[in-house]
Amino acid sequence: MISVDSHSLRSPPGPNYPVQLNVDAKTLATLQELRAEYGDTIRLVKPNRRVAYFVNEAADVRNILVKHHSTYIKGPGFERIKMLLGNGLIVSDGDIWRRSRRMIQPSFSRQHMHEMIKVMFRCCIKILDRWSAIASQAGAINITEETSDFALEVILISILGSDYESRCFANGENPFAFVRSDTTREISAVPKFHELRMILLEIIETRRSGKQSFDFLSMYMKATDKDGVGYSDKELVDELLILIVAGYETAASTLNWIWFLVTKHPVVEQQLLNEFARLSPHSLAVNPDDLANMTYTQQVIDETLRLYPPAWLLTRRAQHDDKLLNYDVPPGTDIYISPYILQRMDKHWPHPLRFDPTRFAATRTHSNSRPYFPFSLGPRRCIGEYFSFLEMKTHLGLLLPRFRMTLMDDGDPEPEMGILMRSARDIMLRPTLRN
């Protein structure tokens, strides 16, 4: 990398006062105001005197996350996640990250993910029975809670297999349920995550001396690095906690927004129904081929993720000098990138606030510079992306053809800007059975 000469540093414009950045609505408003005043790349100084760049040039974002990814490590905000969840794949850097990524990658093969469809299917059938009872009584569904419960159950069974029922409900209450109910991810949750660590360690100990089953835990326990060394118990628990939280939150949030958007757009709903009827006209079964052929459903998922990316603010920190298109990045610079802002910019997306799944139709052509990265980009792109797509397609393909949903509140729920973006209030729907 060519070193940046401090005397000829190309520095972006920006304010001459300290700017506080967190993961909250105030930060979103601040970033939007700065971009409106200073342009797509902004230099700012935080209260701790560290220099930060807020980057909105699509080509620069791709360079940071893809071409020059090794120049950057995880940025501010990941310290809290590390305190709660340990040094798993999402938060680790360098050799630790590379080793773990290579070890975990085989677990997420297409063949393994297709086996997991059975878990997704069973969880959907339980929902079908419950929603049918609610519909018969003209009741209401809290779809925010329903999608959260579904996503948490899917990821826990996919990780723990039969141990989910036998070990997680030993005392009558699922200790992992707080992951859904307490979404603040504050440091005060450390004792609760410590309890989960103890449970996972007990299950691991039992697995080491007993029969293995097909689930992520067994696959992770068999994983070895290039020297044939597997995970230590602590490393294994770190990876499992990351997988539980990340695997749950993405699907829960996205499905919540999908149900809201589809209910508000009857034309989109009908096109989804047409696709499901064509693929599985008389069957409750789902299979990998059907899911792969749900092209319009995939467009709906992609468009929802464009409008409501779960990770709305990404951070990196430059370890070495780097060069953007028009500016230089000195070592130690914090980089802020917002998929939420970039994916709603009208210079890239015509009518950006409109919900239009056909933006992602294969017949449309787009420039490679179009900013779309709800699962990040490059080597650190979410490893569970395909799992999440299968899960959401299974959920929609089984439930939407059987239930017509009506919004019980005409108002749009505002997004809540935390570590991950959720709806600020729960979304309530009234289900009726379709013929």
Image (cartoon, rainbow, N blue to C red):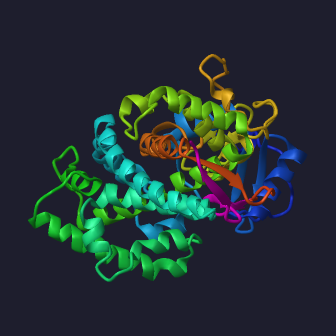
Q: Position of residue 354 (x, y in %)?
A: 78, 38
User: In which quadrant is the N terminus drawn?
Assistant: top right
The residue located at (50%, 45%) in the rendering is 392
Q: Residue at x 51, y 57 (%)?
A: 132
Q: Quadrant of the C terminus?
A: top right
Residue 236's spot in the image, x, y percent?
Answer: 29, 62
**Residue at figure coordinates x 54%, y 44% from the top left:** 375
Q: Magenta includes 26?
A: no
Does residue 3 appear in this view? no
Residue 157 picture quarter: bottom left
Asked if residue 81 can be seen in this view, the reply is yes
Q: Residue 325, position in %: x, y?
A: 70, 31
**Residue depicted at 36% across the width and 74% down the height:** 196
* Percent position of residue 158, x then y: 33, 54
**In the displayed structure, would residue 383 be above or below residue 200?**
above
Tell me: 20 left or right of 292.
right
In the rendered image, residue 426 lying in the magenta stretch gets the answer yes
- Asked if 161 appears above or below 304 in the picture, the reply is below
Residue extent of the magenta highlight: 415-435
Is 132 left, or right, of 259 in this rendering?
A: left
Of residues 348 and 13, the one drawn nearer to the viewer in this rendering: 348
